[in-house]
Image: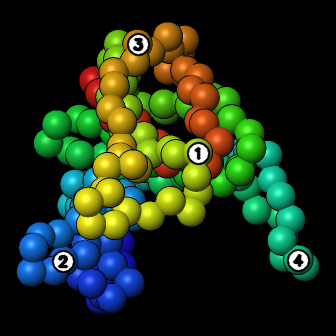
Amino acid sequence: MANLAQIVNVIAPIFTNEKGLFLQPIYFPIAEYAKQGGNMSLDVHVKSPTYKVGNRAPLGYLDVSSTHDLKTGSVFVNVLNRSKASDITAAIENQTGQLGDTAAVWQMNYPDLKAVHTFGDDRKVRPETKNVPLKATGGTFQYTFPAHSLTILKLQVR
């Protein structure tokens, strides 16, 4: 992950003044990705619906990265659904080891894509967490990624 030079007050995820601070929505993904620092990056193969921007090659609506924590056996699957309007269901296939029975889900999603926080109004956009049962068949399960969301799945692999 790249360095964020303007971490406080300029174009920042954290705003401060003499009375306190507030966190912009961008703070939460930065903090969550930082927890994966030191993990091993995994190769991912992504097949998703695409869209065109100008003369560029088609871009996938799902932007995916994944890491493995060797100490705990946890695998993190980070999925950004770029679609403004469509939920996308994807099959997630594990190639090595056996998946646990549940996935821990961290998710950011908010109807207003331009929402910002201000002093005294800084609770609108927050991540949600939950555990979901995995119905894996042969190491593969399906998950639906909501439109314009960032989802991090934490899986246990034995």
Near-viewer residue (33 or 68): 33
Quarter of the view holding residue 137: top right
Compute the Cα span from label 2 to label 4. Answer: 39 Å
Circle nearer the N terminus (4, 3): 4
Q: Could you tell me which secondary element the residue under label 3 belongs to?
A: strand
**Residue at screen point 83% across, 71% down:** 53
Residue 150 visible at all: yes
**Residue at screen point 36% across, 43% down:** 127
Amino acid marked by disc 4: Gly
Amino acid marked by disc 1: Pro
Number of residues whose C-alpha sits closer than 10 Å to that of mark 4, classed few (under 14), some (14–19) or many (20 or more): few
With respect to residue 130, does 110 lie above or below? below
**Residue at screen point 34% across, 66% down:** 118
Compute the Cα span from label 1 to label 4. Answer: 26 Å
Q: Could you tell me which secondary element the residue under label 4 belongs to?
A: loop
Q: Is residue 21 left or right of residue 11?
A: left
Circle nearer the N terminus (2, 1): 2
Q: Residue 69 has which mark?
A: none
Q: Position of residue 31 (x, y in %)?
A: 26, 59
Circle nearer the N terminus (2, 4): 2
Residue at which label 4 appears: 54
Quarter of the view holding residue 75: top left
| Marks 1 & 4, CB-CB < 8 Å contact | no
Q: Is residue 50 left or right of residue 158?
A: right
Q: Could you tell me which secondary element the residue under label 2 belongs to?
A: strand
Q: Is residue 25 left or right of residue 31?
A: right
Compute the Cα span from label 2 to label 1. Answer: 26 Å
Residue at which label 2 appears: 16
Residue at which label 3 appears: 133
Residue at which label 1 appears: 111
Quarter of the view holding residue 12: bottom left
